[in-house]
């Protein structure tokens, strides 16, 4: 690619800025890398938690108590929720 006129000016200006601002560009690239790694980590954690919830509680409604009668709750579930 041959740089002429305005393109040469833009290329040299950018190269000059990159040389003088190397610390700033390095810091910025490390911040971007850190944010991308954090996003990836949070995505993996969310998937792990979703799988864990589906394994432990696969239904939308779960009632459990050995001593309490659930007739009223079962009636509401039968009226409101269809399987």
Image (cartoon, rainbow, N blue to C red):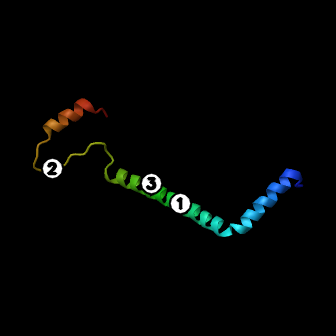
**Mark 1 Cα shell of 10 Å, populated few (<14), some (14-19), many (≥20):** few
Quadrant housing the N terminus: bottom right
Vertical placement of 72 versus 64: above or below?
above
What kind of element bears circle 2? loop
At x 19%, y 37%, the residue is: 74
Q: Residue 35: image x %, image y %? A: 53, 60
How far separated are the C-alphas under marks 1 and 2?
45 Å
Q: Which numbered dot is residue 65?
A: 2
Q: Which numbered dot is residue 35?
A: 1
For the residue pair 23 and 77, the one nearer the viewer reads as: 23
Residue beneath disc 3:
47
At x 60%, y 63%, the residue is: 28
Q: Residue 33: image x %, image y %? A: 58, 63
What kind of element bears circle 1? helix
At x 10%, y 49%, the residue is: 67
Q: Is residue 82 left or right of residue 72?
A: right
């Amino acid at each position: 690619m041959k740089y002429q006129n305005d393109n040469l000016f833009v290329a040299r200006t950018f190269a000059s800025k990159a040389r003088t601002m190397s610390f700033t560009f390095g810091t910025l690239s490390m911040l971007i890398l850190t944010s991308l790694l954090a996003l990836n980590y949070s995505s993996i954690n969310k998937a792990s938690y979703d799988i864990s919830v589906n394994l432990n509680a696969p239904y939308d409604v779960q009632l459990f108590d050995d001593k309490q009668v659930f007739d009223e709750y079962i009636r509401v579930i039968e009226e409101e929720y269809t399987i």
